[in-house]
């Protein structure tokens, strides 16, 4: 029998610690709890977690700083769980290395679903994966520069293919608008999101069964985009 996966829960609210820890254990995970940023960094080193759930409102260190430091020492998914809902907070967390952002109050099943997706993505290799991405009827083969949906090859422009490849290689992780713009057009384009909006619209028309209800290229409003490999959200 394989070992249970371990989650580091970082939150200083005792009631929420108990609620989330009980939820995670019911989902089959081991849980390590930290109530401060400094203790979380110590536990990250000692407990070797498979995933981190991080609240941003900590008593000693700002959660964004904890996120930044965790990303330098842990190659595991970080899911921010926070009452902070502003666009700037979400973008900052994601740009600092968080893989996902769940706002309080949250649905228990939603959190478990986000965790399953993040752990599956890590097991499949995450951004380092170079093989074809196959989701439903869609196949993206970056090496062969080929995209097929339901057996029909789809012709994409170089920029459309670059955007699709970038998102699919980071599947199930939100990439911010700024990160995408910088990756595709360079640093001078980060203040020109209209380029990305236009390109995304064109790409959705080509690969989505229903562009008005995207199945693969999902939006995180005002923050970025996610290539989804699951119906869980």
Image (cartoon, helix red, strand yellow):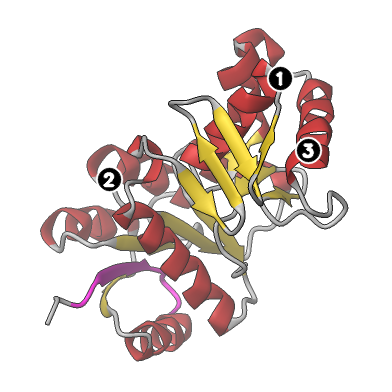
Instruction: Tell which of 36 and 202 is nearer to you.
Output: 202
Q: Which residue is under mark 1? A: 157
Q: Position of residue 87 (x, y in %)?
A: 72, 46
Per the rendered image, the range of residues in magenta is 4-13
Of labels 2 and 3, earlier in sequence is 2
Q: Which residue is under mark 3? A: 206
> Helix or strand or loop: what does disc 2 sit on?
loop
Residue sitting at x 26%, y 62%: 50
Q: Are marks 2 and 3 in contact (CB under 8 Å)?
A: no
- CA distance for labels 3 and 1: 11 Å
Q: Is residue 59 visible?
A: no
Q: Is residue 186 magenta?
A: no
- CA distance for labels 1 and 2: 33 Å
Q: Position of residue 74 (x, y in %)?
A: 25, 47
Report the quarter where the C terminus lies: bottom right
Of labels 3 and 1, earlier in sequence is 1
Residue sitting at x 34%, y 36%: 128
- Left/right of residue 161 with respect to residue 5 in the rendered view: right
Q: Position of residue 149 (x, y in %)?
A: 66, 46
Instruction: Tell which of 105 and 108 is nearer to you.
Output: 108
Of labels 1 and 2, earlier in sequence is 2
Report the quarter where the N terminus lies: bottom left
Q: Are marks 1 and 2 in contact (CB under 8 Å)?
A: no
Per the rendering, the mark at residue 200 is none
Q: Nearer the viewer, mark 1 or mark 2?
A: 1
Q: Position of residue 7 (x, y in %)?
A: 30, 69
Q: Which residue is under mark 2? A: 75
């Amino acid at each position: 029998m394989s070992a249970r996966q371990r989650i580091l829960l970082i939150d200083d609210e005792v009631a929420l610690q108990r609620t989330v820890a009980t939820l995670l254990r019911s989902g089959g995970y081991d849980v390590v709890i930290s109530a401060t940023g400094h203790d979380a960094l110590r536990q990250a080193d000692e407990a070797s977690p498979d995933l981190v759930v991080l609240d941003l409102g900590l008593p000693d260190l700002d959660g964004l700083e904890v996120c930044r430091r965790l990303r330098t020492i842990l190659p595991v998914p970080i899911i921010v769980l926070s009452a902070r809902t502003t666009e700037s907070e979400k973008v900052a967390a994601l740009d600092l290395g968080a893989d996902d952002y769940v706002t309080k109050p949250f649905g228990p099943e939603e959190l478990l679903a986000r965790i399953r997706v993040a752990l599956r993505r890590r097991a499949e290799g995450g951004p380092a994966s170079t093989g074809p991405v196959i989701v439903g009827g869609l196949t993206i083969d970056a090496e062969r520069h080929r995209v097929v949906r339901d057996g029909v090859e789809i012709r994409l422009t170089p920029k459309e293919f670059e955007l699709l490849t970038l998102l699919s290689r980071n599947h199930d992780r939100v990439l911010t608008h700024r990160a995408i713009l910088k990756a595709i057009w360079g640093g001078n384009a980060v203040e020109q999101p209209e380029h990305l909006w236009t390109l995304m619209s064109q790409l959705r028309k080509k690969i989505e069964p229903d562009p008005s209800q995207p199945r693969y290229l999902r939006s995180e409003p005002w923050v970025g985009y996610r290539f989804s490999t699951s119906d869980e959200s």
